Amino acid sequence: MRSLLRYGVILLVLFLSSCTLLGVVTEKTVEHRLANPAFQQENLPLRTLRVAVLTESIGEDAQLSTAFTDASALLEQQVGIRLDIKIFHDLPWRGRSLFAIHRQVEQFRETHQEFDIVVGVALTFNNSEAWCWHNEEKGFDECIGGMVKEARNIALHTILSVLIAHEFGHTFLGIWHSKGGLMESFPVDKYFLESDRKRVLQNKWKDFHQRPNLLKRCFSFC
Ligand SMILES: [Zn+2]
């Protein structure tokens, strides 16, 4: 009886581990299907998000604009979502942590309810909550870090387009990260996994003007 039990446990472990392995091996990103007409058709109709970007001037405004344009292109080619960006300057941050940025983003929302997504970007700061370095080429300090709250407000310490697209992915997918692709916790790939893209398309027309209820808010920051 004990040996039967032992074989059962071994078989169960083998079954579970093979499922896990299969899951990792078979999950692909959408990169190879971008030029496929049927894939492109699934991305229609196009949704244009009204986005406010709150930031201080970083000297070269074109860099900020280009980063969001690139992020928008990534989203448009994969899920048919375009970012219509309005840039606001001269917003002094009272604090530079992600939570401090979010406080000002939430205050901005109170009087600007016309936007789907509001993003706060603070690039130069001197705390140690994120991985930071001085970007010689761009001429400012940059950090890897971003956080979504209420699945509609984004705080950023970076203008890496992949990170921007990743945070916008969270506004449709919630806090969860994936084992690969754009929604990995530290994304090195700029393309959604097939399953993530499918879920974004399912949520594509969500209403961002409704503040999520308390339960959803508790689970919607990362
Ligand atoms: Zn994330």
Image: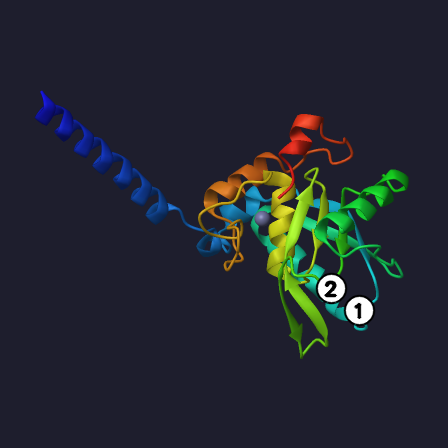
Report which quarter residue 122 is drawn in: bottom right
Q: Percent x, y for residue 87? A: 83, 58
Q: Percent x, y for residue 74? A: 60, 56
Real-space Cα separation, disc 2 to disc 1, in angstroms: 8 Å
Look at the image and tell me in which quarter the C terminus lies.
top right
Give the farthest residue toward the top: 1
Q: Identify the residue at image location x=50%, y=58%.
A: 189
Q: Which residue is mark 2?
A: 123
Tag of residue 58: 1
Q: Amino acid at mark 2?
A: Leu
Q: Nearer the viewer, residue 4 or 38?
A: 4
Q: Percent x, y for residue 71? A: 65, 57
Q: Identify the residue at image location x=81%, y=42%.
A: 106
Q: Identify the residue at image location x=52%, y=39%.
A: 198
User: Does the rendering let one see residue 44?
Assistant: no
Whether label 2 touches label 1, CB < 8 Å: yes
Mark toward the start of the polypeptide (2 vs 1): 1
Secondary structure under tag 1 reads loop
Q: Nearer the viewer, residue 124 or 19?
A: 124
> Does 113 appear above or below 83?
above
